[in-house]
Amino acid sequence: MSTRSIYPLISVGMLLLMFTGCRNGPESGAAVNALLEADRAFARYSREHDAAEAFREYLLPEAIELPDGGVPIRGRETIFTRMQRTSGSYTMTWEPEDAAVAASGELGYTWGFYRVTFETASGQQNQSDGKYLNVWKKDGDGNWRVLIDMGNENPSRN
């Protein structure tokens, strides 16, 4: 792994360290539930409209995607453009497992499992499963939006 490719991972690690001071009171339960609901709404939008449109709707303009096996992709519109190239050839679904919100209430993360379903060249339905981590930040209107999206595919069961 090159030094340059490790910088995004270090950034995510630093953000996660910030969550060691996560909220602990009753208000933290409400904040976590709100963040989990934002992730579920993001997933619903993906099912109803398509993944590229969902990412365009839920990512911050300065978002970074850290794809499995690929270089970081910077910017919501760049991420959307790359996803749109294959739009309609797959469906992406996911469900968050857990979340945390920083004591400030401005940053949070969710993680969970995803599934991508697609048709092979021979017309067979196929799928790949994996896990994801999203770092969320409140936008200027107080809505949760994704700042960093990261996922990796589970090993094949062959």
Image: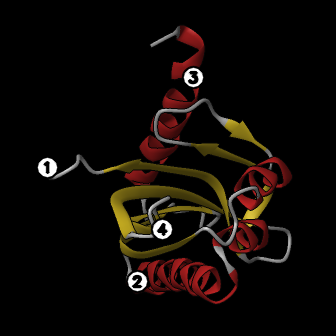
What is the x, y in percent for residue 120? Answer: 46, 61
What is the x, y in percent for residue 141? Answer: 84, 77
Please state which amino acid type lies under the numbered disc 3: Tyr
Q: Secondary structure at mark 1?
A: loop
Q: Residue at x 63, y 46 (%)?
A: 65
Pointer 2 residue: 29
In three-dimensional space, the C-alpha distance between marks 4 and 2, rounded to whole angstroms, equals: 36 Å
The circle drawn on residue 49 is: none
Pointer 1 residue: 158
Pointer 4 residue: 118
Rate crowding at label 4 as few (under 14), some (14 to 19) or many (20 or more) other CA atoms within 10 Å: some
Please state which amino acid type lies under the numbered disc 2: Gly
Please state which amino acid type lies under the numbered disc 4: Phe
What is the x, y in percent for residue 10? Answer: 50, 27
Q: Secondary structure at mark 2?
A: helix
Q: Reading the chain from its start, which is encountered first: label 2 or label 3?
A: 3
Q: Secondary structure at mark 4?
A: strand
Q: Reading the chain from its start, which is encountered first: label 4 or label 2?
A: 2
What is the x, y in percent for residue 48? Answer: 64, 90
In three-dimensional space, the C-alpha distance between marks 4 and 3, rounded to whole angstroms, equals: 32 Å
Of circles 1 and 2, the one toward us is 1
